[in-house]
Amino acid sequence: MKIVTFDKLVGLETVKRSAKICIDSAMKRRTVMPPILLWGPPGTGKTTVANAVANEAGYHIHCIQADAIGSRKHLLESLSNGIAEAKANDRKLVFFIDEIHQLSGRLQEALFYPLTHGKVMGREGVTDLEPFTLIAATTRSDMLDSAFLSRFPEKWQLERYTDEQIRLMLHRWLQSEGYYANHQALQDIAKRCFGIPRDAMSLARKCRDYLLHVNDITLEQKHVAAVCDMNGIDDTGLTTAHRSYLAALYRAQGVPLRLTDLAISLELHRNVLTETIEPLLIRLGFVRVTTKGRELTPAGYSHLATQDVEVLK
């Protein structure tokens, strides 16, 4: 994982302030940092913040994805392996679990004893653990068990970036890559990303590759427009997948569509719709979710009126 420190992070001032206090307090008390929960929309930098906290505190970080953990044994083995790695490097451990809401309630409970007592209970008895800090990231804190949620005295919310913060982040990154950009080009990227730094960086990398292709070193509006056109991203920031979703609702002629029916129609998994496509459409006010299903709003119909008729067939 790339080494990140607080001075490299744009924005997130409240989170960085909380982190510095947490790190300083732990150091002065000669103990580990308490469990930390990072929550916010996808792509707002939760993994990056966890990495920065570990680096600033001088901890070793061991990362796992919650959906890759299938059993209590697997979870506790991952924790034990992380502790062993940290000890080998003469450091304390940050045990980072991404998308922790995907852990079952039973697996969340499996972390209670290690967090509360610093021990693991197994068939061979109780094993003491080296002190560690759990940092968990989630986009759905409402899916966490309330008892488990109470184990996190530190809860830090990561919010969407402002356009200005997106521009600054992209400006720094392009400079580090040896490129320049005019203000409007950066703004054209920012307006399509709705404050999500991951999406902004993804589009900026495509722009960087395009500059390489055309042998230029200054990013201008025409370059951003060309890249967006090639990748099916419209002026609003919607992708081909977003437009296909809207078109499916349009073809339903005002009849609400169930999520399952939409998933079948678009040949996409339900989770892709609810986690990747729908949030932006709902945020823009183009789609309404009701007890009967999904349906277009007047704003959604108005947006489709500006699109090529081929989209609606």
Image (spheres, rainbow, N blue to C red):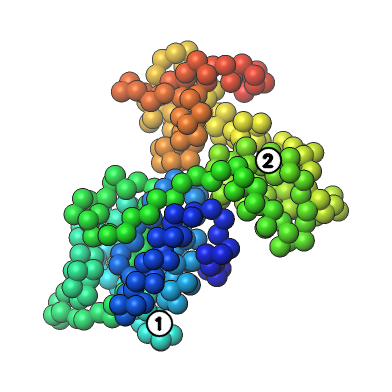
Q: Position of residue 52 (x, y in %)?
A: 49, 66
Which quadrant of the figure has residue 305?
Answer: top right
Which residue position holds label 2? 187
x 48%, y 40%: residue: 276
Q: Position of residue 209 (x, y in %)?
A: 74, 53
Q: Nearer the viewer, residue 37 or 103?
A: 37
Question: Going by the image, does 115 lie left or right of 7?
Answer: left
Residue beneath the point at 20% across and 76% down: 119
The kind of secondary structure element at disc 1 is: loop
Q: Is residue 157 above or below residue 154?
A: above
- The x, y position of residue 215, in whole percent, is 86, 53
**Looking at the rendered structure, which numbered label has been put on residue 91?**
1
Residue type at the position of mark 2: Gln
Q: CA distance from mark 1 to mark 2?
A: 42 Å
Q: Label 1 amino acid?
A: Arg
Q: Please report whichever mark, 1 or 2, sits nearer to the chain's N-terminal start.
A: 1
Residue drawn at the location 43% of the way across and 74% of the way down: 57
Q: Is residue 175 left or right of residue 110?
A: right
Q: Quadrant of residue 92?
A: bottom left
Q: In the image, is residue 291 above or below residue 100?
A: above
Could one spot residue 213 in this view of the protein?
no
- In the rendered image, which quarter contains the C terminus? top right
Q: Residue farthest to the top?
A: 253
